[in-house]
Amino acid sequence: MPITEAGEPVPTDARVTSPTAAGVTRGTRLRRGLYARARRALLSDTGLRLAHAVERTRVLVHLRRSASRPGPSPAPRELAAVMLPAGGGNIGDQAMFEAYLVNTPGEVLAVMRDAGAYIVPDEDQARVRVLSAPLLSGGTLRGRWGEVRALADELRAARSFAVIGADIMDGGYNRAEAVTRAEMLRLAHLLGAGARVLGFSWGEHVDAAASRALARAACKAQLFVRDPISAERLGRAGIPAIESADLVFTADGEREPADISAWVTRLPDPVVIVNLSGLIERRTDLVPEFVALIDRLTADGMRVVLLPHCLRDGDDDLAVCRRAGEAAARPDRVLLVERALRPAEVRWLTARASAVVTGRMHLSILALTEGTPVVVLRTRGKVEGLARMFDLERYALDPVPGIGGEAGSALADLFADTTLRERIEARLPHVRALAQRQFVPEAPAHAVTSR
């Protein structure tokens, strides 16, 4: 305990009251308070609208100055630009990107957070260019002008601009990112590119600023919502949208993963794919539940493939799947996949599985494209609509304690339903047709910058 000059002890929780120290403390608190208030104001609905209005004005000034300089005439509008989700180890994001490429001919500009976030398929290498825009893609307002200007320059020659909406547009993860993507649609329309949002969900509880931003964008862009429940929610919000289905339903094709196929094919026993979501695990520890499920399956004569679907920091499936695999009673009947499979490899694997249990929506979609039944965990209100499209509502479960037993019962019902796979395959053509709506060509918008 500190001692004063008089020899009296000073309580350890005594406050420093010197004028200098107090001034520093007050000044620091004041600056932090002002910064926090400024940030809240900037990220408010009004602040975001103002920031984007200023940004659009800067774009128009930049392009008009560029047009006044001597140079070649503008090229024909042949470019297709697409703004991608985060990617970076998410197989679902990669699957959506590949589906977009399958359905989009000609030159493609892929706007992504960094150049390594996605794999450009070998057959598309010559026609795909990457615009790395980490600040723009992440919705960061400060310091991104160079990225916005680069995108605007590209959009002047673009016939179309698409935002792969996924589960971003309702602002449930990030308000600024959702608003930015909606505002980029308006900018694309302004610059003459046909604008659309592809394959997105709309949650039950959405961010108000994101909702208003999408409503403004709907006046300039086509919105393709990927399930009927999201369409109903948008209808109640007064936001016009076209009912569609996820992009991934428009792609097919399998690729045999040699490192996995040997294990899958060496025995005739049925295989069940189990995925543990790192995103769900952040909220609720379900590993013991899934270990019990795995043990139940292996005891019944089945084998289990533990398949991570998202391998990246923050919501890593691999770490959670590894924990479950290490605790399994019969590790000889469990295969842990420790790399990110390509979507075509996932389709190969799911086509040979008896069922899939997953906390990741796109793993269930890849399985359904092969006619494989799924038990899927509900997250953020985005899988209920998918389940309805295939009449699988009874197999969409809440990720809560007790899920192991509930999933086991669901699987038992699923295996007993001898016509389930047939019914899934019967619904697939309709769902694929809904998804294909997103790629019907649209006439480019009129560019105001040509005036």
Image: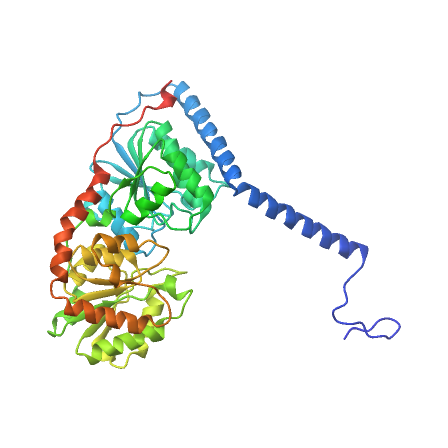
Residue 114 in the image: above or below residue 284: above
Residue 441 in the image: above or below residue 203: above
Q: Position of residue 34 (x, y in %)?
A: 64, 46
Residue for point 19% across, 62% down: 373
Which residue is outermost to the front? 236
| Badge count | 0
Q: Quadrant of residue 293?
A: bottom left
Q: Position of residue 420 (x, y in %)?
A: 14, 62
Please say whether residue 125 is visible from this viewpoint: no
Which residue is outermost to the right? 6
Q: Nearer the viewer, residue 216 or 388?
A: 388
Residue 269 in the image: above or below residue 100: below
Indicate the quadrant containing the N terminus: top left, top right, bottom left or bottom right: bottom right
Q: Nearer the viewer, residue 178 or 319?
A: 178
In the image: residue 250, left or right of residue 238: left
Q: Quadrant of residue 307?
A: bottom left
Give the image's coloring scheme: rainbow
Q: Nearer the viewer, residue 166 or 265?
A: 166
In the image: residue 7, left or right of residue 304: right
Residue for point 22% across, 76% down: 297
Q: Position of residue 145 (x, y in %)?
A: 46, 36
Please say whether residue 440 is visible from this viewpoint: yes
Q: Position of residue 401 (x, y in %)?
A: 37, 71
Indicate the quadrant containing the C terminus: top left, top right, bottom left or bottom right: top left
